[in-house]
Amino acid sequence: MRLVDNLVVWGGVALCLIPTVLIVPVLLLLPGGNTTRNILIGIDQLWNALARGNPTQTISARAWMSRGDARWMLLVKILDQIQPDHCRQAFLNEVAAAKRLVYGPK
């Protein structure tokens, strides 16, 4: 059963890789806005789900939450070199969004 599970996951990764490689560069060339940002976050969440993570969480927030594991800490360090404090901010943004869902907007 584990082999079938792995085949499904990696098949999904393969199917998502091509559109991701084609869509992300085009989106980065478009003027910024909520639609572009939401699509990029959706792609990020898709990759996290394929890595057996929470499908509503970005990889950056997951890396911050899992930074006690050396593999995730390495990702935190890489992403934080690109954008300082990126992973912690991604995590805090997701916590704030969850609070808005539970308690409503301020």
Image: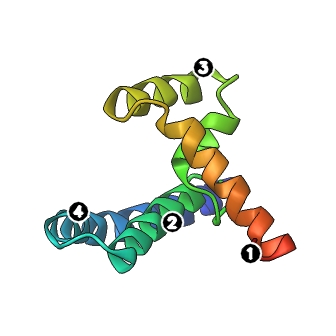
Mark toward the start of the polypeptide (4 vs 3): 4
| Mark 4 touches mark 3? (CB < 8 Å) | no
The residue identified by callout 1 is 105
Residue under the image location 69 percent in, 37 percent down: 65
Q: Label 2 crowding class (10 Å Cα cut-off): few <14, some 14-19, many 20+?
A: many
Is residue 47 something one can see in this rendering?
A: yes
Residue 93, position in %: x, y?
Answer: 61, 53
Task: Single out the residue that lies furthest toward the bottom.
Answer: 35
Residue 46 is marked as 2
Q: How many marks?
A: 4
The residue identified by callout 3 is 70
Mark toward the start of the polypeptide (1 vs 3): 3
| Mark 4 residue type | Val
Mark toward the start of the polypeptide (2 vs 1): 2
Residue 28, position in %: x, y?
Answer: 20, 63
Label 1 or label 4, whichever lies nearer to me, is: 1
Residue 89, position in %: x, y?
Answer: 56, 42
Q: Nearer the viewer, residue 30 or 59?
A: 30
Residue under the image location 44 percent in, 73 percent down: 38
**What's the distance in space between the residues labelled 2 and 4, CA to CA?**
14 Å
| Mark 2 touches mark 4? (CB < 8 Å) | no
The residue identified by callout 4 is 21
| Mark 2 residue type | Leu
Residue 35, position in %: x, y?
Answer: 37, 80
**What's the distance in space between the residues labelled 1 and 4, CA to CA?**
35 Å
Is residue 7 something one can see in this rendering?
A: no
**What's the distance in space between the residues labelled 4 and 3, CA to CA?**
27 Å
| Mark 1 residue type | Pro
Q: Quadrant of the N terminus?
A: bottom right
Judging from the image, what secondary structure is the residue with disc 2 in? Answer: helix
